[in-house]
Amino acid sequence: MAKKIYPDAAAALEGLLFDGMFICAGGFGLCGVPERLIDALKDNGVSGLTVASNNAGVDNEGLGKLLRSRQIKKMISSYVGENKEFERQFLSGELEVEFCPQGTLAERCRAGGAGIPGFYTKTGVGTIVAQGKETKVFDGQEYLLERGIFGDLAIIRGWKADESGNLVFRKTARNFNQPMATAARICVAEVEEIVPTGSLDPDNIHLPGIYVKRLIEGSPYQKKIEQLTVRRRENA
């Protein structure tokens, strides 16, 4: 078996990047975001990217860094409300955006990873989401045809991995990382800790190592919060 562990994000992405490529990025908000790999993409300068991700991070965090550096040409996203630069680029016509309902986006990635080119869903029927899409009636109900997503590269973040690439996610950091991992030709993962093969309980593996081609340990991480909300002191 080829060695999967690389010393850093730049080394893990070496030879994989090219202008105009399609990237599937895991994470949700600032939770479970592949920060080290995003930084390496920024430093590399690869441009004209199409990125499928639930959202584009926030200003100057997560994928927001690649928006700020104008490396992303198109976003396929569900939620973009926390990123003012995303909003500005979209409204000015600098950024192409394909809005996709959140559950549909997750299923499009899962389907692409399973080799399913398309599927029908009721979500979006009768809305702007349905424009230009094929529809079909099943049991008297109208459904939209949605295409599966399969990219050139998946970048994901996990909690622990063993040296074979078997990977475990932690709580909500699992969101979108698991389906994105299968929805591309090659998956590169960063994790908080790499342990010896055999250390992880096989019944608790969330992503089998066969999907992970390259792996880095990205610790230490700072636990970032999108919107910090605190309770007002009673005597204030």
Image: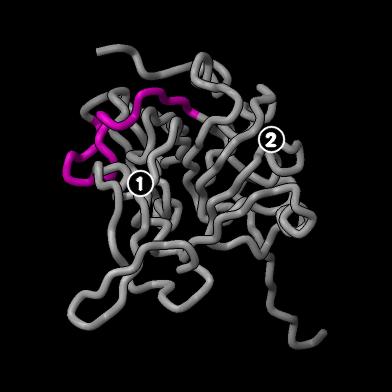
Give the position of the N terminus as an image quadrant. Answer: top left
**Amino acid type, residue under disc 1 in the picture:** Gln
Q: Secondary structure at mark 1?
A: helix
Tell me if mark 1 has few (under 14), some (14-19) or many (20+) residues whose alpha carbon lies within 10 angstroms of its own. Answer: many
Above or below residue 20? Residue 127 is: below
Question: Which residue range is magenta in the image?
Answer: 199-217
Q: Which residue is mark 1?
A: 178
Q: Secondary structure at mark 2?
A: loop
Q: Are marks 2 and 1 in contact (CB under 8 Å)?
A: no
The residue positioned 31% from the left and 71% from the top of the image is 143
Q: Earlier in the sequence, mark 2 or mark 1?
A: 2
Q: Is residue 58 magenta?
A: no
Above or below residue 71? Residue 169 is: below
**Amino acid type, residue under disc 2 in the picture:** Gln
The residue positioned 75% from the left and 52% from the top of the image is 93
Q: Position of residue 170 (x, y in %)?
A: 39, 50
Residue 149 visible in the shown view: yes
Mark 2–mark 1 distance (CA, rounded to whole Å): 25 Å
Asked whether, in this view, residue 197 is left or right of residue 74, the answer is left
Q: Which residue is mark 2?
A: 71
The residue positioned 62% from the left and 26% from the top of the image is 40
Between residues 5 and 79, which one lies in front from this camera angle? 79
